Image (spheres, grey):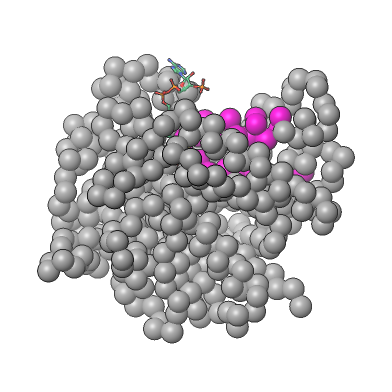
Amino acid sequence: MKLRVGIEAMGVAVPRRFISIEDLAERRGVDPAKYTHGLGAREMAIAEPGEDTVALAALAAQRALAAAGNRELGMLVVGTETGVDHSKPVASFVHGLLELPRTMRVFDTQHACYGGTAGVMAAVEWIASGAAGGRAALVVCSDVARYGLHTAGEPTQGAGAVAMVIAQDPAMLELDVGISGAASSHVHDFWRPLGQREAQVDGHYSMRCYTDALATAYRGWKQRAIARELVLGDGIASEQLARICYHVPFCKMAKKAHVALRALDFAELGRTDTDDAAAASFAAQVEPSLAACSRVGNIYTGSLYLALLSALDASASSLVGKRLGLFSYGSGCTSEFFSGVVGARAAELSARAELASVLAARDRISIDEYERIMGLTAPLGQPASFRFTGVEAHRREYARD
Ligand code: CAA
């Protein structure tokens, strides 16, 4: 019997501070419209060292588990680009901080921003295979995205975590298991050498790598989706998806991706007319997913899932039973286009993530304060649900307040 598998519940954690992107533009002597309209940003989350990948992951995971209610877990995966140790995974710290059961698989998955999707796929296929035996998985995407002060990437930084409980008969989103398209190639578009806190990036090239990967991954998904009659091949396939959530390194990238996707559909239908509906399609299918991303910035592995939560938060009740497309991109690069159908209790479950309150609870800081925090290596030591407190005998220590 085919098992129905997907996202049961979600939880989000962001640093307690943010800056206004217009304040940053003003300080850098840049026209604010470049950042707001050119990149689509509004605010950017700023993590102090105490709010590291582990602390953010633990808080998001705690919230997702509370939203899901009582679930027997058999797997914990953390997808991250910003691990805290060469050997011990972030997932191991989260497992300990949340005092999760001993009888679980616990590991990290890494491939830049795709790491979270690698975890989601591992969990989904584990459950779909029957190996989970009715148990659920906890998948957490957690990152601190840093390019450094005065770099072109500076306005596209951010930090945060999105956790998901993946389960059988999911309430939020049932994934179309096995209907996905992947694309990978060995490119140096974005990477972070060992020992460096800031990423290296070939910015404009990275955008081309993203759209090239999207084309191949989307074609793969479309072929399988048409074969299984999830979409009709004689129409514009992407228009048959109620929403498309993209990986969002900055919001304008999602717009570029969507334009590229439609161009591909047009080309495959042999259409040479201009795409008059492109703007309306973006506004209806993609824009609702960008609200939180525009206020947090890039959170690498979690960006796609923050976009998904935003889309559901905005209009889950009108999306019940409808199919969404999702595109995950990890530089280097690998990517996957996949899809899922919104569950009957998606509105209730997305409301439990309390996205608006999580964002509203933050404090806006000045650019002076942001620059000071970016230079810190030791935690500020403020109370928090979970926080990194320092290194003792080569061991990273955490506190729960
Ligand atoms: N008013 C309005 N718009 C303006 C403007 C103004 N005064 N000045 C410039 N703009 C527009 C530009 O026209 C451009 O828009 P279009 O691309 O639509 O033409 C936009 O603002 C950005 O301008 P530039 O391209 O000149 O900006 P830049 O070269 O300074 O840097 C960037 C942009 C390359 C994205 C840089 O921020 C960067 O390197 N970011 C990190 C890399 C990244 O996010 N890559 C995404 C793909 S890789 C990925 O997805 C994985 C990942 O998470 C990292």
Residue 201 higher or lower than 140, as above or below = above
> Is residue 271 rendered to the left or right of residue 245?
right
Residue 393 higher or lower than 243, as above or below = below
Q: Nearer the viewer, residue 340 or 77?
A: 77
Q: Which residues are magenta?
A: 240-263
Residue 11 higher or lower than 46, as above or below = below
Q: Quadrant of residue 46?
A: top left
Residue 184 higher or lower than 348, as above or below = above
Q: In what quadrant of the picture does the N terminus appear?
A: bottom right
Q: Quadrant of residue 42?
A: top left
Q: In what quadrant of the picture does the C terminus appear?
A: bottom left
Q: Is residue 265 magenta?
A: no
The residue under the point 72% across, 33% down is 264
Ligand 1 occupies quarter: top left
Question: Is residue 38 among the parts visible in the rendering?
Answer: yes
Instruction: Give percent across and percent down for residue 74.
Output: 49, 78
Residue most extreme to the right = 234
The residue under the point 77% across, 53% down is 224
Q: Nearer the viewer, residue 203 or 276?
A: 203
Question: Is residue 66 among the parts visible in the rendering?
Answer: no
Instruction: Give percent across and percent down for residue 270.
Output: 83, 29
Callout count: 0
> Is residue 30 rendered to the left or right of residue 136?
left
The residue under the point 39% across, 52% down is 81
Instruction: Give percent across and percent down for residue 158.
Output: 36, 42
Q: Is residue 249 magenta?
A: yes
The residue under the point 71% across, 29% down is 263
Residue most extreme to the front = 186
